[in-house]
Amino acid sequence: MSVAALRLIHCRRLSTAGPPGVNKVFLWKHLRKIAKVTSTVVFGGCLFISYEVFALDKSVTIDTSAILQEKYKSYIYLSATPSTERENLTFTQIARRELHKAARRFLEISSKLFLQSLDEHFSHVDADPHEVALWLLLKRTQSPKKAVRLQAVQELAENSHWQDYQYQTASQVIDQRTAVGLARTPQVDLRFFRQPPALPDLEDGVSAEDGLRQLLASLPLSEVDRCVQYFTSLALRESNQSMAAQRGGLWCFGGNGLPYAQSLTSVPSEKAESFCLQALVQHSKVQSHCDHIVENGGLQILQRLYQLRRESLKFQRNIVRVIGNLALNESIHQAIVQSGWVSVLAETMKSPHVMQSSHAARALANLDREAVREKYQDGVYILHPQTRVDQPSKADVLFIHGILGAAFKTWRQKDRSTLEEEREAESEDDYTECWPKSWLAADCPNLRVLSVEYDSHLSDWMANCPADNQRKSLAYRSRELLNKLKLAGVGERPLVWVAHSMGGLLVKKMLLDAADDPDLQGLLKNTKGIMFYSVPHHGTFMAEYSINVRYLLFPSIEVRELCKDSPDLRNLNEGFLNIAKENEIKVLSFAETQPTNISPMIKVLVVPTQSADLGLGELIKVDVDHLNICKPEKKDSFLYRRSLQFIQEALQHFISQ
């Protein structure tokens, strides 16, 4: 219309400049042309506007209620708007929406074309540079190049200047892969993660324990050993009242049986939940049962129990342990993330308790298929690095405990006496619950440090399951652990073993089995050193003492295998010496010289020096008892410094590169 008006004015001006007749013919001739052009422009414009309105009707709208009012210029949540709401949009709102869409396209194209700093190319954009950077990083997390994705996740976690609304926006945008990567990045802000979805209210008369029982009842009893069947049946059969009166040993893994009599202050429902949870741990080890657990609402049931028992570290560990087992199945990863477990695991990773953070680290490592190729089965814990690192580990150090030991408590710092605690109160922060994680990781940051846990007992009276006693031989444990270590990638890089007590015999048995297995030759060839802490290479008098009172103690099979000068130990030792010499494996042995208190009235030298002497490598006598031979008193103590020296010397050629 404006064009037509200009042409009309122009024609009128021409009409006043010449003779009257000429002017009249000139005016009407051009008016017809103007009308044709004007009608064409108007008709084309109407078609264009109609098309744009129709296209905008199908586009994505902006939910401005997702952020603070003063941040309308920033990039905010995107969500689909129902058609009934879109019909009520004004032309101004539609135009504003299209402008935001164009701006997003501009940023996406620019992020691919420009390599210079953001300030240089986006200074003209109506947004703060760090706001533009956030969206560029989020876009890079979806890059087809793995290196670009990893770098983007790291930069996202390292930036600390994001505003609260930006974290909220990012938490809605990031996908499963990015969320897991952020959770495994050091010092990540927990605002990156969405909180677990709200759980439905329980029906009247239904408790969390009932949910656990129903879940266990829905799981098949196929493909599980007799112990799993035993405890599942027991958990389903016993009521709260009878379980409160139960005086048997609580099924606890890691060699720390806790009788019910020691926890009489606990409420009955908590005991019942714990018993059901322990059975669920074993079910989660069976791959075919994991799908059943998820399909029957197991992730939500565990989430409710986790929130209910937040004050119990033991409950939390076992729940996260189940999640770590489920995460071994990649088909379940999406369900785990959608049920809100990534935020829980990210928070647990920051726990000051080594056991809590290590269980969460294992679960997240199993979820992180972007940066982790290995899988950590139940009982294999990664102590370092527990987060993503720039460079891959160059070698492994593997810790294996002995009878009644555990993956963490065996390797803690030496317990202090009351006087020492008072005298060294000012240095209390230096105490560590696990020196391989705290001290060794700091002194050798380019190593991967693993710890293994398995059940062991002195007597069959202490066994968790009546059908469990015949599964504890060295041969059985060796096969079981070799399979787990293979999945964890142990044997693919140089390796040093660190073993205490019976754990040393297990190491020797595994290496002998690896020598006979073509698929495990790498484990033997990459073994560069072994450190033994009071390992009974030739047996121990303690085993003979137990056997002499067998009708009273019923010694376990692992204790019976430790008889002094037994043929099995002799064959094991001779076979190991042969392969150790052939493969030039370095050996360092520590021997205890102080007796160990096994009761208020009895002290026994558990492993004499003669038995701790392998006959190969250096033997060092230490003025400690059997329990403290693997627990350095301080970081600058001789026991730790010599242990560190041996590891560094055995792996010097590899970690110095």
Image (cartoon, rainbow, N blue to C red):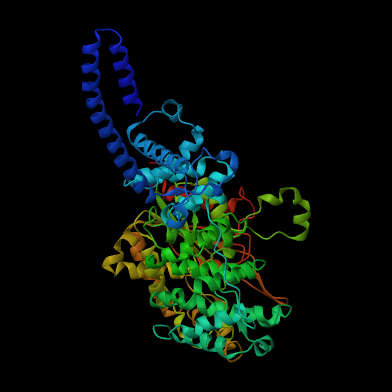
In the image, is 137 to the left or to the right of 343?
left
Residue 8 appears in the figure: yes
Please name whichever residue, 312 or 301, is drawn nearer the observer in this view of the structure.
301
Please name whichever residue, 40 or 427, is drawn nearer the observer in this view of the structure.
40
**Vertical arrangement, residue 408 with respect to residue 440, above or below:** below
Please name whichever residue, 630 or 321, is drawn nearer the observer in this view of the structure.
321
In the image, is 650 to the left or to the right of 634?
left
Please name whichever residue, 151 or 633, is drawn nearer the observer in this view of the structure.
151
In the image, is 303 to the left or to the right of 486?
right
**Vertical arrangement, residue 58 with respect to residue 38, above or below:** below
- Estimate the x, y position of residue 452 in percent, counting from the top left: 48, 65
Res 265 → quadrant:
bottom right
In the image, is 358 to the left or to the right of 139?
right
Look at the image and tell me in which quarter the N terminus lies.
Answer: top left
The residue furthest top is: 18
Look at the image and tell me in which quarter the C terminus lies.
Answer: top left
Res 311 → quadrant:
bottom right
The residue furthest front is: 21
**Residue at (30% x, 35% y) in the render:** 42
**Residue at (64% x, 83% y) in the render:** 205
- Estimate the x, y position of residue 278 in percent, counting from the top left: 55, 77
- Estimate the x, y position of residue 303 in percent, counting from the top left: 56, 69
**Residue at (34% x, 65% y) in the render:** 578
Marker count (numbered)? 0
- Estimate the x, y position of residue 153 in percent, counting from the top left: 44, 46
Residue 403 appears in the figure: no
